Amino acid sequence: MNEMKWTPLGPPSPSPLPPPLSVPVAFSGDRGEFFRLVRRGAALEFVTLGFYRFWLVTDIRRHLWSNTQIDGDAAEYTGRGKELLIGFLFALAILVPIYLLYFLAGLEAERHQAFAGLPLIAFFYLLGQFAIYRARRYRLTRTVWRGVRFWMDGSGWSYAGRATLWGLLTVSTLGLALPWREAALERHKMRHSWYGDLQGRFEGQGLEFFKQGWWLWLLAPVAIVVFPLAPFFYAAFKAVQWRWWLSGIRFGGVQLESTLRRGALHGLYWKVIGWALLLSTVFGLYVFGCTMLVANVSGATFEQTIGPSGISQSIPVLILTAIGYLALALALGVVTRLYLMRDLWVRVLASTTVRNIAAAANVSSRGTPASALGEGFADGLDVAGF
């Protein structure tokens, strides 16, 4: 009879953990719908002398957010145009006296041949950085995904001080410190950014950014002198920046990755330049036509029309020119929003994946909505984003 040996069974060996699941970021919005949205918004801006832009910005964000899907769920933008208007009016009440002080100081500086305006210029830069931080806080607190709000804490003035010091270093190094500036400021912003109770962080390094685009820094002076090269260099720089920035974003265990190609944005910037040249030509023909029309009505000769005090400087022509200029600015706004907001958004999202999305499955809601004062400052100082 064979002797049977029995080996006691131990605990089963743990199975290897599956790799973190990667899900693409999808965009489902219709381009024609977005074009109609910004075209209608431009017409209403024309009628309201620009004040409709607060509602237009809100509609644009709602369109972009609601059509951006991660793991099958779309984001939601809960901001309102009225909030942006109130924030702008509050910011304007603060900025107008400062602008007046800057104007008076500039006159005094010119009279005394001094640099009395430099402290105010530095203050405006500091205020602009404060506005950038607070505007980002506003947009985050108006962004909801799967019922959980993004939010942000921290001091806008602390960020502004850091940005100012890094700005001085960047200028003194002729731009070479820019990658390290971007990394340091983004780490500060992400450290104070949250998705529910998941704290954000930024793992991108300045040296990594520099390695990806070092040749852009070397050839930038050439691009400035040779204009046709400038759009190519700037588009390549923005593509490198987007890829580096997205690949460094983390919220808890959730990671973003981007594979955006260096030449992915070239066409968008050249289309904007092409439309700008075309619209400017149309505007020039419009002004010429208005001048000739007024001259024919008044019976003026050609010399009387083009002279320094001729028909071209008359009140009717100046009014028609101002109307045409406003229409030109709004048309350029439509082109810019279509190509450098919507189309750029789509191309960047198409290159983006989210890893370990399961880490955001059990997140508790935290944070409260921030005021729109930062957006108001950003709009008044022309440093607003979308």
Image (tube, rainbow, N blue to C red):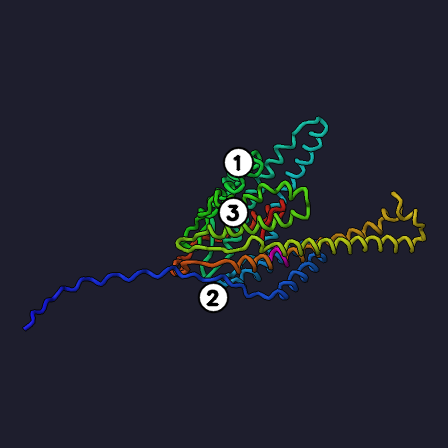
Q: Which amino acid does label 2 sit on?
A: Gly
In what element is the residue under mark 2? loop
Residue 18 visible in the current orientation: yes
Instruction: Tell me the magenta residue range.
Output: 338-342
According to the image, label 1 marks what residue? Answer: 165
* Front residue (pair 326, 264): 264
Q: Distance between the residues labelled 1 and 2?
A: 42 Å
Residue 54 is at least partly visible in this image: no
Q: Name the residue under label 3.
A: 212
Q: Does the magenta stretch include residue 339?
A: yes
Q: Residue at x 58, y 44 (%)?
A: 216
Give the residue pinned by disc 2: 72
Say whether residue 137 is magenta: no
Q: Residue at x 78, y 51 (%)?
A: 322
Q: Nearer the viewer, mark 3 or mark 2?
A: 3
Q: Residue furthest left?
A: 1
Q: Quick one: 220 or 361, which is closer to the camera?
A: 220
Comes first in the chain, label 3 or label 1: 1
Reply above or below: 122 against 271.
above
Query: In the visual, does 75 lie left or right of 124?
Result: left
